[in-house]
Image (tube, rainbow, N blue to C red):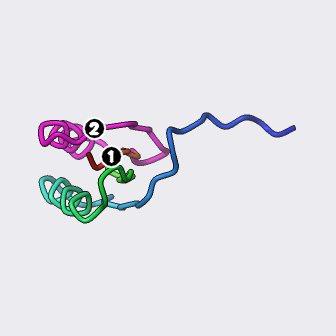
């Protein structure tokens, strides 16, 4: 039997790789992508450490977007946010 993998809430409906994208452009691109998605859809955004992962989730929360998960990967963070 193989090793169990930690469950995730749901597979994302879309993915956005913003590694190397500075603030606030990464927030703007995330918000534009969410605005194009149907309500209830889940977006996974890949962000760099430092200012991007510190600022983008807080900015999304202030705009009313629920953050479902932030997972630290090897050299970036995977942020899961749902379109309300």
Classify mark 2: residues with Cα within 10 Å, few (<14), some (14-19) or many (20+).
some
Q: Position of residue 17 (x, y in %)?
A: 36, 61
The answer to which quarter of the image holds residue 66 is top left
User: Is 44 situated left or right of 7 in this image?
Assistant: left
Q: Label 1: few (<14), some or many (≥20) within 10 Å?
A: many
Question: Residue 4: x, y in percent?
Answer: 72, 35
Q: Nearer the viewer, residue 19 or 37?
A: 37
Q: Nearer the viewer, residue 49 or 30?
A: 30
From the image, tell me which residue sits under label 2: 66
Going from N to C along the chain, the mark reached first, 1 or 2, is 2
> Magenta stretch containing residue 75, yes or no?
yes
| Residue at (32, 49) in percent of width and height | 48
Q: Residue at x 33, y 58 (%)?
A: 19
Q: Which label sits on residue 18?
A: none
- Could you tell me which residue is drawn at 46 percent across and 53 percent down? 12
Q: Secondary structure at mark 2?
A: loop
The residue located at (20%, 57%) in the rendering is 26
The answer to whether mark 1 and mark 2 are in CB contact below 8 A is yes
Say whether residue 76 is left or right of residue 3: left
Quarter of the image with the N terminus in it: top right
* Residue under label 1: 82
Q: Which residues are magenta?
A: 49-77
Disc 1 is placed on an element classified as strand
> From the image, which quarter does the C terminus lie in?
top left
């Amino acid at each position: 039997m193989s090793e169990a993998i930690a469950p995730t809430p749901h597979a994302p409906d879309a993915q956005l790789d913003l590694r190397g994208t500075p603030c606030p452009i990464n927030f703007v691109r995330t918000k534009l992508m969410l605005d194009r998605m149907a309500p209830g859809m889940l977006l996974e955004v890949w962000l760099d450490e430092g200012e991007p992962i510190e600022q983008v989730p807080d900015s999304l929360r202030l705009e009313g977007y629920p953050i479902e998960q932030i997972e630290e990967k090897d050299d970036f963070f995977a942020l899961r946010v749902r379109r309300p």
